Image: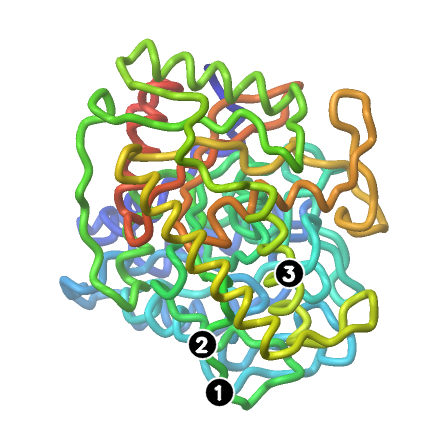
Amino acid sequence: MSYPKLTDEPGAQEIASAIRAGEMSAHEAIDSAIARIEHLDVHVNAVVACDFEHAIKAARAMDGQEPRPDQPIYGVPMTVKESFDVAGLPTCWGLPEFAENIAPRDAAIVQRLKAAGAVILGKTNVPSELSDWQSFNPVYGRTNNPHDHDRSPGGSSGGAAAAVASGMVPCEFGSDIGGSIRVPAHFSGIWGHKPSWGLVSLQGHTHPLFTGQILHDTQISVAGPLARNAADLEILLRVTAQLPLQRHGKPLAQCRMLYLAEHPVSPVDTSVREPMEQAVAALERAGVTIDRNTLLLPDLTSQHSGYLKMLNIAMSGGAPGPDGAKPSAQDWFALMAQQADNEAQWAELFRTYDFVLAAPAPVLATEHSKETIFRMEVPIDGQMRRGAEGLAWSGLATFPNLPSTILPIGQSDGLPCGMQVIGPRWGDLDCIVAADAIDRSVNGSEG
């Protein structure tokens, strides 16, 4: 099996190793990335708020310095999602009324990335209010999928995925509450990781309406990395995690996995289902035990209902819903209780299974539309289905606060297809390691 790759540019650790070995300087790495952005972004429109002057100055200051042991990504050029604060750059979430909202300080993950040696070149495009699987807004325009400019790179971390997939930068940082890391990785043919909730701080990732207020991390929303390989995902997670990380993994052939081919809410198109089935068959040939059903699985219809309610409340800040009803504290506590019960059911499932394999979304990269995907219909094997149904695949890991790693596994008609590798809560590194092993087994990757 294979998936379309657009670049042979080195990854983050390759660049950092080259700088440490004296094979290139930090400013050479930064200059090269800037040149790629200026050349490639004309047709993609991924990097929408640039900070090249400060990046070059920071990189030149790094030249001749000895990287510290706690700087594993020394001199690595990066961008981050527009919704994260970067001091001196606008944070508007695609909303014109906040286009001049200049961040006074860096978000927590930006601080950690810089402390680890990364050089931030700018910020990448998002949909308005981060609420679409496309990346289009009236401030910065539309981001194109670098595999097909008539299609979406995903959302809401779509600019992030497009920048990495095209080779502009080796890695990125996005956020995810409705598949916003996982769907762009899937649509764009790269790697992404949605962490366990609470592992990475979201401080400085705040709707501009609430600028200046100190807010706790939004329930079920997470921040996580995107890259072109598993090793870069791991190092980015390690330098941004605010809790200790451990590996508990075992060889792939000794794993028992559950493959969710279907969801009662959302059918999967053949273009996604066939690469998934081929990947699962390759794993079975490699000796992995894979089940296709189990009585341990929570009621996915009920889980999805609770997820949508929690998602809508979190995204709206508790504003009235479409029916005009405002959620009460009692409503929220009932959802929290349902979520806790759901978490316990998944924890019990993971006493039997090491990982759960599932589609990141029911379709491949969608064609551009003026309407948000969640308010339109998309074709699933010739039948039109509500686009919002696809959130069921995001909610699998989001509602129970589980980690999920996306790896590219194949293609259909030249468009990449990804797979979710979901694990038990706090098993983030194990998910990434397992995804890396799956990549070697399915794609024959050398890592």
Q: Nearer the viewer, mark 1 or mark 3?
A: 3
Instruction: Choose the circle earlier in sequence order: 3 or 2.
Output: 2
Q: Position of residue 275 (x, y in %)?
A: 53, 19
Which residue is tagged 2?
A: 203
Residue at (64% x, 33% y) in the render = 362
Q: Quadrant of residue 348?
A: top left
Q: Residue placed farthest to the right in the image?
A: 370
Judge by depth and name the residue closer to the eye, 300 or 166: 300
* Contact? badges 1 and 2 (CB < 8 Å): yes
Q: Position of residue 109 (x, y in %)?
A: 39, 69
Q: Residue placed farthest to the bottom in the image?
A: 212
Secondary structure type for disc 2: loop
Q: Nearer the viewer, mark 3 or mark 2?
A: 3
Which residue is tagged 1?
A: 214
Residue at (72% x, 64% y) in the render = 128
Above or below — where is 123 with respect to 42? below
